[in-house]
Image (tube, grey):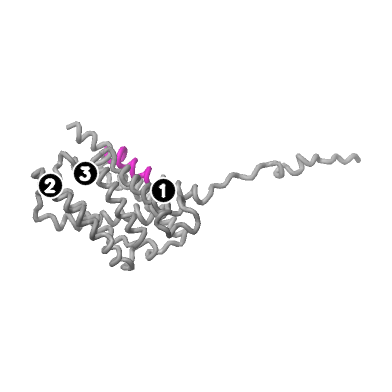
Amino acid sequence: MRVFKIPESIERPSAALPEPAKLSLRAVTLLEVASVVFTVLITAWVIMPLRLGNWWMESLPGLLALLMMFNSHRLRGETPRQLGFTPEHFGRACRLLIGPMIVALAIVLLIGRALGSLHFTAHFPASFFGRAAWGLVQQYILQAFIFRRLRSALTSEGEAETQPSLRLPILTTALLFALVHAPNLPLMLLTFASALLWTRVYSRAPNLPALALSHGLLSAVTAMSLPDWMLRGMIVGLRHLVYQAF
């Protein structure tokens, strides 16, 4: 009986196949950031203008993004303490915030006084606390996720704790925060400047409640100081263009 020898190229075809491409941790990290920013933009430019009338449908992209973020924290072993949810660093963060906040609030109030648009009412405390609560969510996304991911992706190993190496992650974080407030140009400028402050403070004293209080106070004072024609109701996305048209 003749025995046929199987050619080596046929016998072991897997040896000739290239290994599957693998994404680096840095690429995965940047994709995580991009997915969150993309979700916010889709919500502002597509979901909200559709006025679906269904809270679950309108919130679904954001909820999925939050689940992805929570899972990312779990996989990386990040704790609430590391993210800035505990009282640790609260005092230091407040000390770093107080000087710039006094200057920022003074500028906003002076502009409002000059334009005759100051309109503080009895609703200011409710506005402050409501905006601070929403600010906590925004600061969590901006600092505990986006900035931490950008810091990991844009700095070399061993550089993450030095302030000069954090300039690019801080600047990129502020630019992304301004981007999601497009096309409301005055609001984009305000959010860019404030995000630079908040992110720099977080890099030195990671405490989200302190940033949320700063966020709520600055947002409430700005809303009751600057005229509506300047802020356009702080509306962003496609609705801002519709609002401006009318």
Q: Nearer the viewer, residue 156 or 128?
A: 156
Q: Nearer the viewer, mark 1 or mark 2?
A: 2
Residue 197: percent from left, percent from top: 29, 54
Residue type marked 1: Val
Which numbered circle lies on residue 182?
Answer: none
Placement of 192 over or under 129, stated as above or below = above
Residue 55: percent from left, percent from top: 27, 47
Dominant SS type (magenta): helix
Residue 6: percent from left, percent from top: 81, 40
Placement of 11 over or under 141, stated as above or below = above
Q: Nearer the viewer, residue 205 or 103?
A: 103
**What is the C-alpha distance between the residues marked 2 and 3?**
16 Å
**What is the C-alpha distance between the residues marked 1 and 3?**
24 Å
Which residue: 58% across, 44% down? 21
**What is the C-alpha distance between the residues marked 1 and 2?**
36 Å
- On the image, numbered disc 2 is attached to which residue? 112
The region drawn magenta spans: 37-49
Is the residue under label 3 in contact with that under label 1 (CB below 8 Å)?
A: no
Residue type marked 2: Gly
Is the residue under label 3 in contact with that under label 2 (CB below 8 Å)?
A: no
- On the image, numbered disc 1 is attached to which residue? 33
Which residue: 33% across, 41% down? 41
Left or right of residue 233, residue 8 in this image: right
- Find the residue positioned furthest to the right: 1
Left or right of residue 27, residue 51 in this image: left
Looking at the rendered image, the quarter that the N terminus falls into is top right
Which residue: 48% across, 49% down? 28
